[in-house]
Amino acid sequence: MLPDREFFDRLADAAKAETLPRFRTGISVANKEAAGFDPVTEGDRAAEAAIRNLIESHFPDHGILGEEFGNVGLDRDYVWVIDPIDGTRAFISGLPVWGTLIGLYHKGEAVMGLMDQPFTEERYFADGKDAFYRGRDGNRKIATRPCADLGQAILFTTSPHLYTGDIKTRFEAVQSKVQLARYGCDCYAFALLASGHIDLVIECGLKPYDVGGLIPLIEQAGGIVTDWNGGPAEMGGEIIAAGSAEVHQQALAILKG
């Protein structure tokens, strides 16, 4: 038995109960990376624990790949991919572009997904066939927008400072051709793409939990998500998401080098 939208909502609500009360409260932050800054908060850990508890209670035969508490049963047919707070840097800065990401993989393919932004009260969900938005301005099915020319595209990336070496050169080559480039939206940028507001999201160094919940949203809204070689995006790495096949093809031709 597969989970339904109600169960995904339960997961998102359980995470929201842990993250939203801690947002903009000056909570303590731990650094997971000795040589840099990879922040984690008590909200990250509490939200993932809440999500895991529900999954383990209702789908004990499913695997779990999570950011904060490791992995269980990755060889199972169904694996949940969890990022309790994608955009922790935004979270600790008071910027409401972070989100809770929950994806479900079947034999390695992302088939269902959710992105929840509790502060703005926006929830995006892909049920295996279609993608949907629910927010203050109503509920609706969403779709990416047509854009046939990279020169007319709006591009988002988390930060241009994350790129180095050859991948920086290739990213900047794409950026130089788009109509508009904006930075700093983390997972929220992918949701904007699925909703038809922007055309292209390019990222580097992603983990599976950074993208697992987002792939179904974009694909089931009519978009395309791959790595920079045009292969599957489920395991992360350098990722490109586009609202149209034309923009994806034009940007990919540059990113491949």
Image: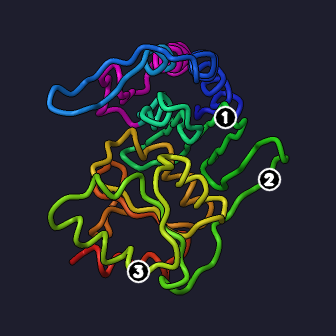
Q: Which mark is residue 152?
A: none
Pointer 1 with pointer 2, Cβ within 8 A: no
Identified by mark 3, the residue type is Gln
Q: Mark 3, residues whose alpha carbon is within 10 Å: few (<14), some, or many (≥20)?
A: some
Q: Which residue is mark 2?
A: 140
Q: Residue 229's spot in the image, x, y percent? A: 27, 69
Q: Residue 42's spot in the image, x, y percent? A: 44, 14
Distance from the alpha carbon under mark 3 to that under mark 2:
28 Å
Q: Which mark is residue 4?
A: 1
Q: Which comes sooner in the sequence, label 3 or label 1?
A: 1
Q: Which comes sooner in the sequence, label 3 or label 2?
A: 2
- Judge depth for marks 1 and 2 and give the one in front: 2
Residue at disc 3, secondary structure: helix
Residue at disc 1, secondary structure: loop
Distance from the alpha carbon under mark 3 to that under mark 1:
34 Å
Q: In the image, is residue 61 part of the stretch drawn in magenta?
A: yes
- Judge depth for marks 3 and 1 and give the one in front: 3
Residue shown at 58% from the left, 23% from the top: 24
Residue shown at 46% from the left, 56% from the top: 183
Residue shown at 44% from the left, 75% from the top: 248
Identified by mark 2, the residue type is Arg
- Residue, far right: 138
Query: As rendered, which of 232 and 185 lies closer to the eye?
Result: 185
Magenta region: 48-77
Q: Residue 190's spot in the image, x, y percent? A: 53, 54
Residue shown at 32% from the left, 26% from the top: 73
Q: Which residue is mark 3?
A: 249
| Vertical relation: 157 (above or below) 154 | above
Residue at disc 2, secondary structure: strand
